[in-house]
Amino acid sequence: MKNLIYLLITVTSLISCNNQTEQKNSVSNPNEPMSLQSIKKIDVHSHFRYDRDDLSAFFEKWNMQAVLVDVAIEEDESVSRSWDKYIDLEKSHPSIFWLCSSLIGVNIDDPNFAEQEISRLKKEINDGAKMVKVWKNFGMVTKDMSGQFIQIDDSRLKPIWDFLKTQNIPVIAHIGEPVQAWRPLDDPNNPHYNYYNLHPEYHAFKHPEIPSYETIMSARDYWIEQNPDLIILCAHMGSMSHDVQMIAERLDKFPNMYVESAARFGDLAGQDSKQVKAFFERYQDRILFGTDYGNNSLQSDVTSEGLQNEIEYLDTNYSRLWTYLSTTDSVEIRNQKSIGLALSADVLHKVYYQNAVDLLGLD
């Protein structure tokens, strides 16, 4: 989209943010390097659970908003969620955050399961949920009463998908894990090395009872195919981030499928930059920006130094991703060295912002 007018917000530092005046709109010049403020942004996959005194200033600096994606985890036959925390944060910053609910398969054998979940989702959609998340519990964790892992294409979930279609609510689907989860963890440069060391319960290589990568991906693909009117945003590049061609094949096959990038930039950086750039350009209308960034502690439980480190960490990591997407500079992401993709302003605008606005029906 040529001659697009973008909102430019210039802020010199986090400390001085509150002293800045309102900035004026400016036309982006494609012949000049883009500043990080020149593109509006929506982080479509974030986990900011608690407020911070400088959170508004940080998002203003980045000209950014975010979707708070609920995390539902099975714990001893109960479900732990982040929903209430996100409700509180969204109420405190309604101009920054949107909400995403969640669905998990615990108690799927109950004949009233679908009805009860639909009732809950109705309330949470009324409370502002713009999406519903399904997690890797499907396929890798939660079992039904027969002892079988519940796959995402389970027919007992169909009434829920039909309901979400009527509400025009997309599903953000973190189904499966990177293929490395089914491989030995013997390379410290593996972009997922640290994660599986910290979360060995998801390192499927050590858990032969977990279905194969291919089984879970096949169930996911069949689910997408059987629900062509359901908009599905495949989180983490659809657990296919090691191979952009593999993602492309699914995007070509399933017109209702989109992908987002959270926590998978290391996999992208490990591939040929020209191929990755071509992928972004070809599917520029169906790729969304996400990070998985957030926080986990009350502000009162973190020292002032810790809060400063937290903001610096976020700033450094958002900057690294901006460098990768918008420049040809050398960059290292999760031990993967690459050069930036230097995507055009038009493509960046779609990936960072417009695709999320369109998919979620945002104002």
Image: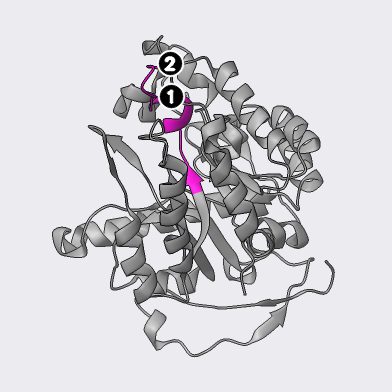
Q: CA distance from mark 1 to mark 2?
A: 6 Å
Instruction: Determine the main secondary structure of the stretch shown in magenta.
Output: loop
User: From the viewer's perspective, is 253 left or right of 216?
Assistant: right
Residue drawn at x 46%, y 71% as measured from the top left: 96
Q: Quadrant of the C terminus?
A: bottom right
Q: Nearer the viewer, residue 299 or 310?
A: 299
Q: Nearer the viewer, residue 35 or 215?
A: 215
- Residue at image mark 1: 140
Q: Nearer the viewer, residue 329 or 76?
A: 76
Looking at the picture, how far across and down is residue 44, in whole percent?
54, 56
Residue drawn at x 79%, y 66% as measured from the top left: 31
Q: Quadrant of the N terminus?
A: bottom right
Q: Which residues are magenta?
A: 133-147
Looking at the picture, how far across and down is residue 293, in whole percent?
42, 51
Give the answer, above or below, for where 96 lies relative to 180.
below
Residue drawn at x 50%, y 20% as measured from the top left: 180
Marks 1 and 2: CB-CB under 8 Å?
yes
Q: Secondary structure at mark 2?
A: loop
The type of residue carrying mark 1 is Met
Looking at the picture, how far across and down is residue 25, in whole percent?
66, 84
Residue 123 within the magenta-colored segment of the rendering: no
Q: Nearer the viewer, residue 270 or 69?
A: 69
Residue at the outermost right position: 2
Residue drawn at x 37%, y 30% as measured from the top left: 195
- Residue at image mark 2: 210
User: From the viewer's perspective, is 134 left or right of 4?
Assistant: left
User: From the viewer's perspective, is 352 left or right of 127?
Assistant: right
Decide if residue 260 is in sight here. no
